[in-house]
């Protein structure tokens, strides 16, 4: 694995020797990745068919494991204040697949973790994960199981992480896992799609009803201001990949640089940390200002203007790169009829 610009990446050279299917050529691999991708988009009714085919599971690992590998470290940029909490807890990745996020979690924490489990029900996915672990992480303390009942009763704080799995298993199955595992915290890294957001709101309500507090992305446990809107809240990250992976993404015509996601963190028995505002959406900048939709206070949604002349050029350059999901502290300069003019406070970075 390589550390690029402070973020972990994985390339094809790393993973190819440990795929459960040997592809005859690059073209063969591209065809298989395209097949898997189509299952996730045009052929959603066949979404799980690839789990029965070694060739497609290997293609999934070759493309989606490598392109998602840096994603966890980007998520932790948004959850920077919770790194110690996660590192000191039992971590359980639900729907771990071939280790798509499982190995990235270990790498991010430099494997300084007391407990790291993955739960995966697909036999071939478990087989693929085991081969990658044997080849790339042979001495690391990871256990991948097929059933939550196999995981021992918790001995310390426990956090379960749903990684692109709630969107496939559904809310009710996710709730069953949560009841079985009795976690103290729940983290979600799910697709940033409009269709999933509706499911996420249902899950959010159920978690708050059962005693969890939202720490990210919501400033409070109050009702989501987008609940009855034809819109959705999601976060964005910009991922820098290893050149091999960047080239592969171009060959299969799938953009894995700009990645929308639904990121969430809920903790039991702990009130929400003070949040200034979450950026929900960014708009094309004008000559004079930057425009954002923000959620702040007790989940209040509004449009804000950031006036460029209030900052030096280097600060404007940084502010213009802020993405949906970023937390900002601000003061109100002027209240207009349909917007606020704000001044970003604190460190700009």
Image: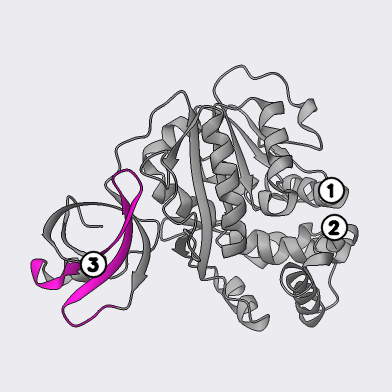
Q: Residue tagged by mark 2?
A: 51
Q: Is residue 63 above or below residue 349?
A: below
Q: How many discs mark residues in the rendered view? A: 3
Nearer-the-camera pick, 210 or 43:
210
Residue 112 makes an appearance in the image: no
Q: Which disc number belongs to residue 122?
A: 1
Residue 135 makes an appearance in the image: yes
Of the numbered discs 2 and 3, the one sitting upstream in the chain is 2
Of the numbered discs 1 and 3, the one sitting upstream in the chain is 1
Q: Distance between the residues labelled 2 and 3?
A: 49 Å
- Tell me, what colour scheme is on the image? one colour
Residue range of the region highlighted in magenta in the rendering: 285-310
- The secondary structure that most of the magenta stretch takes on is strand
Describe the element under mark 3 as helix, strand or loop. loop
Front position among marks 1 and 3: 3
Q: Does the magenta stretch include residue 259?
A: no
Q: Which disc number belongs to residue 337?
A: none
The picture places residue 148, in percent across and down from the top left corner, at 76, 31
Q: Do the residues labelled 1 and 2 touch (CB within 8 Å)?
A: yes
Q: Residue tagged by mark 3?
A: 338
Residue shown at 69%/18% (left/top)?
A: 153
Of the numbered discs 1 and 2, the one sitting upstream in the chain is 2
Q: How far apart are marks 1 and 3 (CA)?
A: 50 Å
Q: Is residue 121 above or below residue 283?
A: above
Question: Left of 309 or right of it: where is 109?
Answer: right
Q: How crowded is mark 3: few (under 14 residues within 10 Å), some or many (20 or more)?
A: few
Q: Is residue 305 magenta?
A: yes
Residue shown at 54%/40% (left/top)?
A: 205
The picture places residue 78, in percent across and down from the top left corner, at 40, 50
Question: Left of 218 or right of it: where is 69?
Answer: right
Q: How crowded is mark 2: few (under 14 residues within 10 Å), some or many (20 or more)?
A: some
């Amino acid at each position: 694995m390589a550390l690029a610009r402070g973020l972990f990446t994985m390339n094809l050279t790393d993973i190819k020797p440990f795929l459960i299917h040997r592809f005859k050529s690059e073209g063969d691999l591209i065809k298989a990745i395209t097949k898997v991708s189509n299952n996730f988009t045009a052929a959603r009714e066949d979404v799980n068919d690839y789990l029965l085919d070694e060739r497609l599971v290997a293609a999934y690992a070759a493309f989606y494991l490598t392109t998602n590998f840096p994603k966890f470290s980007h998520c932790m940029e948004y959850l920077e204040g919770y790194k110690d909490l996660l590192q000191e807890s039992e971590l359980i990745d639900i729907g771990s697949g071939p280790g798509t996020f499982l190995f990235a979690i270990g790498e991010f924490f430099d494997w300084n973790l007391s407990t790291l489990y993955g739960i995966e029900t697909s036999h071939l996915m478990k087989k693929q994960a085991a081969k990658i672990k044997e080849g790339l992480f042979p001495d690391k303390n990871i256990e991948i199981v097929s059933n939550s009942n196999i995981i021992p009763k918790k001995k310390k704080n426990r956090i379960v992480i749903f990684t692109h799995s709630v969107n496939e298993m559904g809310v009710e199955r996710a709730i069953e896992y949560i009841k079985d595992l009795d976690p103290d915290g729940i983290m979600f890294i799910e697709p940033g799609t409009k269709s999933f957001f509706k499911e996420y709101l249902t899950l959010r309500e159920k978690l708050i009803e059962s005693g969890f507090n939202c720490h990210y992305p919501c400033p409070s446990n109050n009702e989501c201001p987008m609940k009855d809107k034809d819109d959705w809240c999601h976060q964005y990250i910009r991922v820098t990949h290893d050149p091999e992976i960047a080239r592969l993404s171009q060959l299969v015509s799938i953009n894995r640089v700009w990645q929308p996601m639904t990121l969430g963190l809920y903790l039991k028995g702990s009130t929400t940390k003070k949040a200034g505002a979450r950026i929900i959406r960014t708009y094309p900048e004008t000559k004079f200002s930057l425009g954002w939709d923000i959620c702040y206070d007790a989940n209040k949604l509004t449009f804000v203007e950031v006036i460029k002349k209030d900052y030096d050029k280097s600060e404007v350059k940084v502010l213009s790169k802020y993405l949906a999901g970023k937390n900002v502290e601000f003061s109100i300069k002027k209240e207009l009829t349909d917007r606020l003019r704000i001044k970003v406070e604190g460190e700009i970075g």
